[in-house]
Image (cartoon, rainbow, N blue to C red):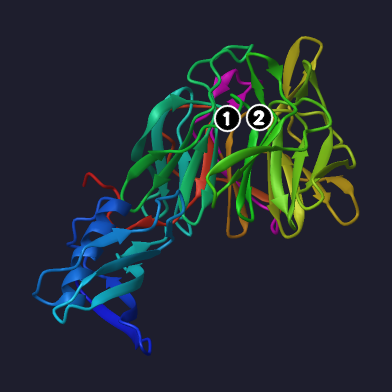
Amino acid sequence: MDGCFPGYVTFLPNRNILSLDLYFSVISPKLSITGESSIICKVTIKASGLIWGSGPPLQFSLTIVLNPLMLQRNRMFIRWGIGGQGADNHFYSVNILLMVMILLPLKILLSNVVVHLFSCFGNLVQYYDDEKKTWKILTIMPYNSAHHCVVEVENFLFVLGGEDQWNPNGKHSTNFVSRYDPRFNSWIQLPPMQERRASFYACRLDKNLYVIGGRNETGYLSSVECYNLETNEWRYVSSLPQPLAAHAGAVHNGKIYISGGVHNGEYVPWLYCYDPVMDVWARKQDMNTKRAIHTLAVMNDRLYAIGGNHLKGFSHLDVMLVECYDPKGDQWNILQTPILEGRSGPGCAVLDDSIYLVGGYSWSMGAYKSSTICYSPEKGTWTELEGDVAEPLAGPACSTVVLPACVPYNK
């Protein structure tokens, strides 16, 4: 391990106790690091040699429990105690705080990448290489899924719920939760949601993940669950005022907004706002158009409702209008530039000054899309990116993330 630097050492008066802080810098790309446990093992070996020299190391005990956010971006904090009898027959206790800096070379894609979790009940994870203008396969999910959600937290991707095959009654919805670490190309399973969910909304707010509504074998859901990233536990919070599925959501100024969706088979234009501090939902101004299976994106203190469809009689019609919501004025406005083509169930990601839509289904064309379109609110224009995803799809989940320079892993 390259670059190991001791920190401050303090001897406490009249006690045979050594208090020691160590800072380790892992900077060698040649290290065989496959995950959190691998780092702990290597740091432990190095720490023992550093403290006790060539002599026999004292017995140590690890006092930390692995949790989903043990690694925070490129830092990891480890605390443990080492105790035993020294050469002078005195008992020594050493408290060690390690801050491991993982300085492996990184590159930012989207400024170079949108990470896209493939759908249509597939398990591919793809990313967009902006330099080569093409979508590439990043990794494979542990299971097939569609109509799931993905949430980025400290450069981890949390994949939640979904269904492994289509059923109008939600019989194949799941409560699975997995976390992907792009540095090590590894997955871990986390505690499942308390209810199975597909066609729902998930987001991160402060130290929590929220999953809202959706559908399963019991029907449409109004329940809302909150996952504490520190305690690794799920709990219920205040439910939606009405059961909803196929709605869209976004986080803005510490509140969660939910728009549209399907309620008991009816497409709705509703907008709800959740205050996590008060644990209450409030009804806001309705959208101008009923829509579901759409997207809601935040940019420049505005919420943009894009895509989706609604019912006219027994026919599904693409919603072409783009609406913009002002939270301060509680008002929706229809923008002059409609979407390029119908898109129901596209993946959505925001990067820099643009909103990206990946895939989706066009009811007017009767076809799944494999292209990616991009909307610039500042310019009021739509463009289509070069390069298509592996195959046409709908119901994916998208996010932005920083990828390591070793991507693709199999090169």
- Residue ranking furthest to the top: 314
Whether residue 265 is visible: yes
Q: Residues within 10 Å of mark 1 (few under 14, many from 20)?
A: many
The circle drawn on residue 360 is 1
Bounds of the magenta span? 358-379
Whether residue 335 is visible: no
Q: Residues within 10 Å of mark 2 (few under 14, many from 20)?
A: many
At x 54%, y 49%, the residue is 231
* Towards the viewer: 95 or 74: 95
Estimate the x, y position of residue 132 in percent, counting from the top left. Answer: 36, 51
State which quadrant residue 199 falls in. top right
Q: Amino acid at mark 1?
A: Gly
State which quadrant residue 218 falls in. top right
The circle drawn on residue 389 is none
Tag 2 secondary structure: loop
* Towards the viewer: 183 or 363: 183
Q: Amino acid at mark 2?
A: Gly
* Residue behind mark 2: 342
